[in-house]
């Protein structure tokens, strides 16, 4: 297995790593609720879980009898 003959400097390693950059998160606005959310992620609005404009999970109370 080949090994380097001489040690690489810290500057040389830093130059190689400069191409790895953090990218900002992409935000979208849901057409159904108008809320902003991360792309390709489900998001909660008023006790409902939305994904791609559809309700996936509904944790809201069923009606007036649920408040008793």
Image (cartoon, rainbow, N blue to C red):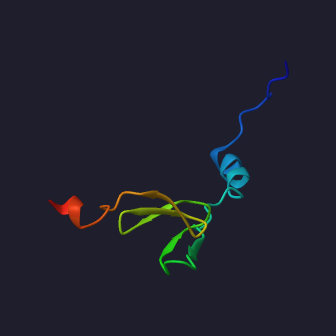
Picture quadrant of residue 20: bottom right
On the image, the x and y values in percent for residue 17 come to: 68, 52
Give the side of residue 62 with respect to residue 65, left or right: right
Q: Is residue 17 above or below residue 46?
A: above
Q: Percent x, y for residue 50?
A: 51, 64
**Farthest top residue in view:** 1
Residue 58 image offset from top left, x and y in percent: 42, 59
* Direction right: furthest residue: 2
- Residue in view at x 65 percent, y 60 percent: 21
Percent from the top left, x then y, of residue 13? 68, 46
Which one is nearer the viewer's eye here, 54 or 17? 54
Which sits in the foreground, 14 or 50?
50
Q: Quadrant of the N terminus?
A: top right
13 sits left or right of 42 in the view: right
Residue that appears at 85% across and 22% down: 2
- Horizontal relation, residue 66 to residue 10: left or right: left
User: Between 59 and 4, which is closer to the camera in this rendering?
Assistant: 59
Instruction: Give the tally of numbered discs.
Output: 0
Question: 47 or 60: nearer the eye?
Answer: 60
| Vertical side of 16 occupied by 62: above or below | below
Residue found at the far left of this picture: 68
Q: Quadrant of the C terminus?
A: bottom left
Q: Residue furthest front?
A: 65
């Amino acid at each position: 297995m080949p090994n380097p003959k001489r040690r690489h400097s810290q500057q040389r390693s830093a130059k190689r790593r400069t191409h790895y950059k953090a990218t900002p998160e992409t935000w979208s606005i849901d057409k159904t609720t108008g809320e902003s959310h991360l792309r390709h992620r489900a998001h909660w609005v008023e006790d409902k879980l939305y994904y791609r404009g559809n309700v996936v999970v509904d944790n809201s109370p069923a009606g007036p009898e649920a408040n008793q």
